[in-house]
Image: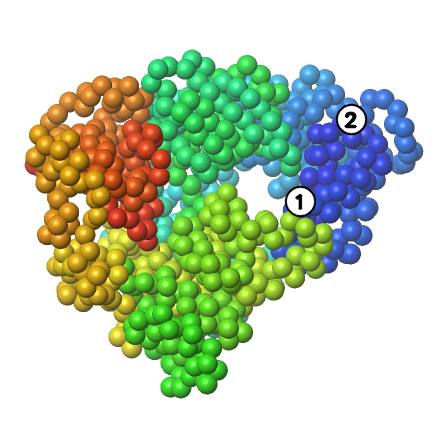
Amino acid sequence: MVLGTFIHELLQSALRNNFFELNEIKSLAQRKMNSREMIYQLYSSSVKPEDFVEEISEYNLRVYNFINRYIQKQDSKDQIVTNSFNSKDNWNGQIDNVKDIEENIWCPQLGLKGKIDVTCESKSKIMPLELKTGRASVSLEHRGQIMLYIMMLAKLGYDVSTGLLLYLKEEVLREIPVTNNEKRDLITLRNELAYYLTKTRKEGNLSQQVLSNIPEPINHHSACANCPYNILCCTYLKHENKNLQNYKHLKEVQSSVLAHLKPVHIDYFVKWTYLLDVEAENSKYTKSLKDIYTIPPIEREKKGCCIINLKIREMNYDGDHLYSTTFEKVEIQKNTNFYLSGIGEGNYIVVSIDSRPAVAAGFVSYVGKTDITVSLDRDLNKIYPHKTFHLDTYESSFSESFSKTSLTIILEDSSTATKLREFIVEKKAPTFQTKLSKKVIIKGTPILRNLNKLQQRAVLKALSADNFLLIQGMPGSGKTATIVALVHLMIELGKTVLITSHTHSAVDNVCVRLIEKRLKLLRLGSESRIHPKLRPYSENSLTKDCKTVEQLEEIYNSANIVAVTCLGSSHPLLTKRIFDICIIDESTQILQCSAFRPLNACEKFVLVGDPHQLPPVIKSKIALENGLSESLFDCLQQPENLVKLTCNYRMNKRLTEVANILTYNGELEVANDDVGNGTLQLPKFEDCISYYKSQDWLIETLNNSITSSFQVLDTGPTWKLKQDAAWYKNLSTPVFENNEVMNHVNSCEISIVVVIVRALLKAGLAACDIGIIAPYNLQVATLSEVLKDIEGIEVKTVDQFQGKDKEIIIYSCTKSSDTSVRMQIDKNY
């Protein structure tokens, strides 16, 4: 796999840079071999560098021979005469031009998409070229790939009748034509595959569900025995009680690969596969990939998450075949405002033109009011000069894929997977040591001194746990301080710690506290997504000087604290190390199976969270009713393995009373009188009252007595009112023309929020002490735009604000609708 990737990149880079000389190709190969990306790939795949160097050295001459024979038009300075590509069956033509490298091609008419290794031109005809690094089998699979590209390019209007199949190892280049019969057979196979991939499950009782969307199994001993997915196939068939009498070879494989599993394990896996599939089915009704080629651009822009009719203003080459491309509207209007598009920094973007979807893709690096910059994988100025572009972002399936691959861990035949099955599926009770060592007391005393009794108990019980512990951190109870103390003590005891959570902000919240304690750590993940204070500890920063795999291993293996999000836990480091403890913060927000990957890399774990706060986001009602929202915390919670942090340092007694009435049944306590009697301090309150003396509602809202700490402002039926404020009209964008979207923006509430914020500032409250929360991204974006002149104020969704503290929180409910009409919360916005 690593060799194939390297050879592809070597050939493509040589073609992209017009390297025709052998010494140029050798130098290019050496630079790639020494690159950070290659060192990382070798580490990930456990390939020895010396073995790899020996393999790739053979390919330098073969790349040169291919270019010299089929592309180069003039004599080479260091031309080497060889008998390369001399087979009589080889293509006898000449490549006149390399049109594109890794061309992204979507063909909605055929229901296919792919990436062509090299798009060539020969005698004014387009030819797709596919590179293979194995033996020259010219197999049906390889020829079928070329044939599909020919069909796709033809549908896009290109003059194409044949393609090229390049086997570089044996210096074979075959021209591949396609007949009508082959086209028919390929589309039939495509439709059969699509049938099983898109087959909808029947609704009904979960126990009656049948995995009817899988095809009949094959029956080939070596194919089944060596298949990396045989345990999945056999698990499904076992659950179905499939009679394998006529599948002798598969039956033997099934007996072998499922020997370590019990029926209850198989039932658990199938249930969660079903729930994830149902949730994915529901996602079809949100903005998805197919919208890009089934809905006109102007309608997509109204739906949100799309900006149309753009031109390239500026393009810079960033290296590594990435192009920083800045787009702006072909005609900038007064109301042009990309902030309200639903596209933000870090979003994955698909770039299309009127005649063709998905000509490029990349990630947003900057969003301004009238311009947007995307890091793309190709130079659009060169390939599509003077074209008008459309940018789309859509709901990615990465999270779904991650959850499903993580779920498969429960089936593995390993010691860590066995423990997960015992505790999660079989509900085995955890055990705890009755005594802690003297070393724990000596090392722990100074670390635990500043914690309260409940926090100390949580840390010590985590140390005594043989398997796992749950810590319920109620609001303001100092769960982060507890986590930091636990990590600190584990490090003092010479242990290793893995820290993870659902979001970057939750992981960083703990990590920032740790570096304040002068504890060193390794923060995995994209440097652009992590807290600025943690960038010196990022993977990118700590490994930037690594020149060898050994140096990279040293960095990875020497880190006693490693931090990463759950979605980032597929990092190869977690497959090569077993940590003494894994701590999952905000664990009640995480899908149960999404926690399996980090837990598979530890001896024991601590789940920290609060079942009464944010659960996992589930869109499907059926999946919700059948238990998809049950977090691992919920699954494992028992009185004997749970420690509750009930002492609250954040809310005064009035807010604590509200929380107890609504949620905690009196369990939440106030830490001390100072906290309990705390009120909002407004140093210029009298000046503010004088200024707003005619607005009684506002004066009452700003009342800073304890009894007024929690207030609800009834705005009335704003859904009846016209949203025609002057400021709102100036903000109006195509998104606001969509009545469905408009239900997720409330200009009346925005006006009220703005008045309250400006009054608080006049009363002397700092902007950084004000937090504004709304349930919908569009309301958040509109509020942010209206308040952009106030530096330091934070406006976020509920999820984004989790774990943050502010002196005052203003919550904009946003939706206002006719109560006689049954409504549901729309999670698209």
C-alpha span from label 1 to label 2: 22 Å
Instruction: Indicate the position of residue 223 as horizontal and vertical percent values.
Output: 59, 57
Query: Is residue 509 visible to us here?
Result: yes
Amino acid, disc 1: Thr
Disc 1, SS: helix
Instruction: Indicate the position of residue 791 as horizontal and vertical percent values.
Output: 35, 35
Disc 2, SS: loop
Residue depicted at 46% across the width and 72% down the height: 489
Residue depicted at 73% across the width and 58% down the height: 48
Query: Is 556 rendered above or below residue 102?
Result: below
Q: Nearer the viewer, residue 500 or 435?
A: 435
Residue depicted at 42% across the width and 69% down the height: 486
Residue at the spot of label 2 = 71
Q: Quadrant of residue 335?
A: top left
Q: Quadrant of the C terminus?
A: top left
Query: Is 551 left or right of 509, judged from the image as shown?
Result: right
Closer to the chain start, of discs 1 and 2, is 1
Query: Is 761 left or right of 12, judged from the image as shown?
Result: left
Q: Residues within 10 Å of mark 1 (few under 14, many from 20)?
A: few
Query: Is 110 left or right of 134, judged from the image as shown?
Result: left
Residue depicted at 60% across the width and 60% down the height: 556
Residue at the spot of label 1 = 5
